[in-house]
Image (cartoon, coloured by chain):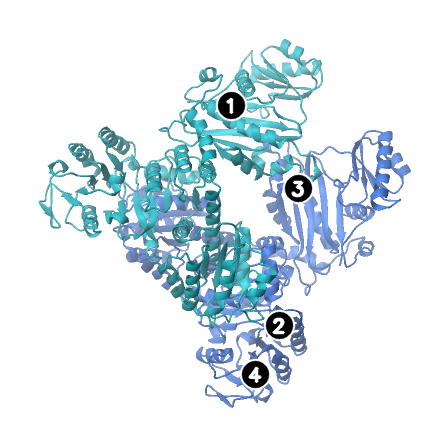
Chain colours: A blue, B cyan
């Protein structure tokens, strides 16, 4: 990777003098960017291009070639790559389009190129990409129309257009980049490589990306969390709805995975999700330029009451806190203010404030240890000194080790002020919500980094690496086919007992005799048809509740037989007979797998298992009272997620009720996670209801589908 | 009002030649704005100001004076106003600060001024305001540093600073206003006056406001809905959190009411809420300039796949729909596009698209009746023709009667394109989410106006105007004091029976003998202490469930007696004995009042009653599964709101269950609304649980607090 971004020599296949050709644009960009290494234009029809000696093919070059950039139509690419293998090159940058994004034919071509590259240990960027820019090596190997400013953000994008849009957005606001990488179809180099590379590269302070699919979510999350470097990683993820997924397929040929898994996994390890380009830009600016924010308490200084109120709303709604100013602090501030102003938070220095009236309140608040950030609002009123105020705020941002964040509301008059901040690399906003939202993300990130425990993280991931197998692994394996199959009740029961779940007193059998015998001392009982026969028991009347005696039981059994014979033409079938339990609180735990059963191996794509839990019973889907963790999660992760559900309040004894066994619930969720690791063949699992009492939890009904 | 915004003569008290005085700024603004009427500067120390003859006081002026603008310190204002009464003036514009916003003393002064003004039929704008600008009369009677462009938006703001910020924002984007009004402390002229005035003023197409409190929410909502004019009204409401409410108090001295009432009431009648200044601006621009949008179906044309996907996500998440393009439509489009492009929605005309490639897809989509708006995305790629593309889109916006909405992603290169749209009054965006959000609001508004039924609306409001009284009005009245009191169970039962609620079989009594007798044929029964004794029955053990026989009943009664004697030192107390019902689904209906018991009279401030309903039982607060309507609501309003709750799905028979009596539930909610109108003394009402069965609904427990 290092050699690709910092080559000492580059060949450009398809270089040209014709200004409307991409090959010409790229060659010019390389030359003009000030690249100090060797440049070899390749074009069979030229001997010299833009003053440089041209070659017919890469293998004709005498000297060493680190990187070959390919800009010829896709049908020629395979030959070019074959020719490249004659030399010892490090990387290919394939700009050419016409690969997997156009369908099966293109996909095949892409694979062929990749096979050759793999064989010769050549890394590939693209195809169907814009190229890359490395500002710290003064190299622009791309056809971007403009070039980014130099800075500390490592940015990469699965959409070339997003690169150019972001670039165009960043220049007027002075936001600089270390790298700007268009990864196109990412046949080889993908988000995982770039995140790893940027984490290690000292020139990179912030990593930022636009992505449509995640090749190996599980590994990305693992690598990010386990890295010895802590850097913010911001991702704008397209393809969050069913409708957009089909658009992605026709765009890059990628399949966008489950958005729940992405959101759960990333937030669990502190990867920051940007919801739109504005957030992406604001977060990049904030992390690139801002001081860290070590808490949630914000103080406001404003020259107008209205915006102060709006900012207060925004802070509370956004999950931050209004700093409480002590009487003595208020007194100190009031000394420098006219009597009509307010020294409470928001500190209102009122409309006739000139620049200097901003200074003391900002200083006093910034010095206070109980305040984590100062939001400074300016509206352009009659006497407002916009430039001078900007300079006073600028000065404060440089003096204090916490964020002092200006929000200048307006545009025509105020832009002279905002520009001063951009010029000096200070995050500035024109909208209150943007400022507050960025501070929230900054504060969360700072807190997470401070509480980060290397030991805990490694312990967590060890589970995946150890690859321990379940006791009944081989038995489960028998049911694993290409298409999902439900596990028979006997096996599910074994797995449940292996995990130590408490089950109701129950018998699984095919004989009425056994059922009647077993039920004798257990009335009232429940008779259910086995999982392998009918999945939705309630919908298809495969369940008989509250059976009071033998007579009722026999009647139920006979009805069931008739039903099954009629609907499924089966004479023998499995039933489960259980004691009838009266639920106190019904809970559920489920799991779903992204990727195949080898998903936890390093080279296998997918996020692994998402464990879902919440209010159970028949109305689970209606209440949507869900918590999520992505496997592997720590007990702490599970607890945090459980605490956000509503049913948690009920379990822990809301409204004067006795608390139920919360610890046991946590333990059960943890054990379901264990189960997915011991049996990665599980595609989906549904434990519903899990009855929770004061003493225990009882797993009444478990269904598991397995598959390759 | 008309005379204030269109005066033929103005006196400015406090006019001055000193450029740093507000009086000088205002006088200059009036002169420079091109006002064609008479201008009288008032200043005891001058005979001429800026070439105009100056007067010592207003009463010295010989001619007619329509409006007097006051810019002197607050301590002189009362004298000025007294002097004004010597002439027949129409309105006062009090710029001066130092009134209710500074505390009780200022409030008193404000009241004194208002009393005099009322007596002489003089309307007052302010105090503590910026003044106003009427672009259609070329009058700038304000000290705003800049002036707005001429347009069709009537804007008013409770914060002067918001006026200036909005102004500063609007000028570079060419957004024009008809009126720009700073209402300050609104001692007289408030949102109600301005909304009524702007609804009638033909120069106003869009009404827009920043507000911190709503003086009479009920009346504002009524006037807006009952008006014969349909115009969009956009409100940015500050003071949505407890924290910001205290800031409001110290700012304008107003009390910000319940945000739930504001949100419910406004959305019920189609008033549009902007959540921040960006939304406020975007909505103003959209409604001021855009064609209407008669549905939800959006088609996208884009020169880049990535942004197309992001836009798809945004459309679906934002509540709009992706238009489905028929095969034949796709074929038509594909004819004009290169083979690698996509003619599905989003239509991807790919990165090498020059301006003309945009034209045919836009035309074809805009002509299609099944498409309600076309979103046109541009990213600045290598060959992109930004200006030319803007012109092609501009042309289309003028040809078709539906929104064609450009989103130009970027800034440095793209701003030349966006400026073309601003210059031509076409809504344009630089962020996809902004465009989609604005289209959603536009589509909702257009649909609402089309389905608007004058008859239905008048019927609805008639209830409030008729002021019919409940049968037991006088009896209830006995319990109405300044502080809230709970109604005794006997009275609550009477009200419930008056409304025709089904109650459990029950007796309300103070005697154990009655209880035992009544219970005889009704076991199992429930014994509860009366409402007037204990409000939270469950928390304080004032309720005994599932009593099976007389022995248990007597025991429960005795325990209850002991408890009450011990805790409340009371010997006699009311109990309610009810048959025990097994709930199928527990529901609740509540009501809360904003304003006092006269709130439905025209001059009494407040929103009236908010009726809340949803999942009942003891966990109501935990599930927060609420629907809201503000009184008066139509059955349709109630239904819409009920359908959004989760419990609605259960009632109407989710997961194969038999549907319960939904009609009866709607009817009960409607009746609770009736009850609040018949008994406006009700401060709060809590019907929980309302048991819903297939046949009926049963009101098990009702508590009502009344008060003035």
- CA gap between label 1 and label 4 equals 85 Å
The chain letter for the residue carrying disc 2 is A
In the orientation shown, which residue stands out farthest toward the top? B513
Residue under pointer 4: A65
Q: Is residue B577 above or below residue A299?
A: above
Q: Which mark is residue B421?
A: none
Q: Which mark is residue A99?
A: 2
Residue under pointer 1: B704
Q: Residues within 10 Å of mark 2 (few under 14, many from 20)?
A: many
Q: Closer to the observer: label 2 or label 1?
A: 2
Who's the residue at 68% across and 26% down the image?
A: B582
- The quadrant in which the N terminus of chain B is found is top left
Q: Residue A521, percent across and down?
A: 85, 31
Q: Residue B176, percent across and down?
A: 33, 52
The earlier-in-sequence mark between 4 and 2 is 4
Pick the residue in front: A528 or B63: B63
Q: Residue A116, percent across and down?
A: 67, 78
């Amino acid at each position: 990777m290092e050699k690709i971004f910092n080559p000492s020599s580059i060949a450009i296949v398809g270089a040209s003098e014709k200004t409307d050709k991409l090959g010409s644009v790229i060659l010019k960009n390389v030359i003009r960017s000030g690249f100090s290494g060797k440049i070899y234009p390749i074009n069979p029809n030229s001997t010299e291009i833009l003053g440089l000696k041209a070659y017919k093919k890469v293998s004709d070059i005498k000297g060493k070639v680190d990187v070959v950039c390919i800009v010829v139509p896709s049908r020629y690419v395979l030959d070019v790559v074959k020719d490249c293998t004659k030399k010892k090159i490090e990387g290919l940058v394939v700009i050419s389009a016409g690969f997997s994004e156009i369908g099966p034919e293109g996909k095949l071509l892409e694979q062929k190129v990749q096979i050759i590259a793999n064989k010769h240990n050549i890394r590939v960027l693209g195809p169907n990409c814009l190229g890359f820019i490395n500002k710290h090596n003064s190299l622009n190997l791309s056809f971007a129309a403009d070039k980014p400013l130099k800075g500390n953000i490592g940015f990469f994008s699965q959409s070339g257009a997003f690169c150019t849009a972001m670039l165009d957005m960043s220049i007027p606001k002075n936001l600089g980049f270390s790298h700007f990488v268009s990864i196109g179809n990412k046949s080889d180099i993908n988000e995982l490589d770039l995140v790893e590379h940027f984490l290690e590269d000292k020139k990179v302070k912030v990593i930022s990306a636009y992505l449509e699919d995640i090749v190996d979510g599980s590994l990305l999350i693992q690598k990010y969390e386990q890295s010895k470097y802590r850097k913010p990683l911001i991702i704008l993820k397209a393809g969050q709805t069913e409708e957009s997924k089909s658009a992605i397929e026709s765009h890059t040929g990628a399949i966008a995975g489950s958005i729940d898994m992405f959101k759960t996994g990333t937030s669990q390890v502190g990867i920051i999700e940007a919801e739109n380009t504005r957030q992406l830009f604001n977060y990049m600016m904030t992390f690139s330029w801002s001081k860290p924010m070590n808490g949630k308490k914000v103080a406001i200084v404003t020259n107008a009451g209205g915006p102060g109120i709006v900012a207060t709303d925004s802070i509370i709604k956004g999950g931050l806190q209004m700093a409480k100013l002590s009487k003595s602090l208020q007194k100190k501030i009031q000394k420098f203010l006219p009597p009509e102003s307010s020294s409470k938070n928001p500190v209102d220095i009122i409309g006739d404030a000139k620049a200097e009236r901003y200074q003391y309140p900002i200083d006093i608040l910034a010095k206070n240890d109980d305040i984590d950030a100062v939001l400074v609002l300016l509206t352009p009123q009659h006497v407002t000194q916009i430039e001078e105020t900007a300079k006073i705020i600028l000065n404060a941002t440089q003096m204090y080790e916490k964020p002092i964040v200006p929000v200048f509301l307006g545009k025509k008059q105020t832009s002279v002020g905002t520009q001063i901040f951009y010029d000096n690399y200070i995050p500035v906003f024109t909208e209150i919500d943007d400022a507050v939202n960025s501070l929230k993300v900054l504060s969360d990130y700072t807190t997470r980094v401070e509480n980060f425990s290397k030991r805990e993280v490694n312990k967590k991931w060890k589970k995946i690496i150890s690859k321990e197998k379940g006791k009944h692994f081989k038995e489960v394996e028998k049911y694993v086919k290409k298409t999902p199959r439900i596990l028979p009740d006997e096996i599910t029961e074994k797995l449940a007992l292996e995990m130590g779940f408490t089950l109701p007193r129950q018998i699984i059998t095919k004989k009425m005799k056994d059922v009647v015998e077993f039920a004798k001392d257990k009335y009232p009982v429940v008779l259910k048809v086995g999982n392998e026969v009918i999945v939705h028991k309630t919908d298809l009347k495969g369940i008989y509740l509250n059976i009071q005696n033998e007579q009722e039981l026999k009647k139920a059994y006979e009805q069931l037989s008739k039903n099954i014979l009629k609907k499924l033409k089966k004479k023998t079938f499995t039933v489960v007979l259980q004691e009838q339990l009266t639920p106190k609180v019904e809970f559920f735990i489920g799991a779903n797998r992204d990727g195949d059963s080898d998903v936890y191996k390093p080279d296998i794509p997918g996020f692994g298992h998402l464990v879902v839990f919440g209010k159970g019973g028949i109305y689970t889907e209606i209440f949507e009272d869900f918590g999520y963790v992505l496997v592997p999660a720590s007990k702490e992760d599970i607890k945090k997620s459980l605490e956000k559900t509503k049913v948690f309040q009920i379990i822990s004894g809301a409204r004067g009720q006795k608390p139920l066994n919360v610890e046991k619930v946590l333990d059960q969720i943890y054990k379901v996670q264990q189960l997915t690791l011991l049996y990665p063949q599980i595609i989906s699992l549904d434990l519903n209801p899990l009855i929770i009492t004061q003493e225990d939890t009882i797993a009444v009904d478990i269904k598991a589908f397995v598959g390759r």
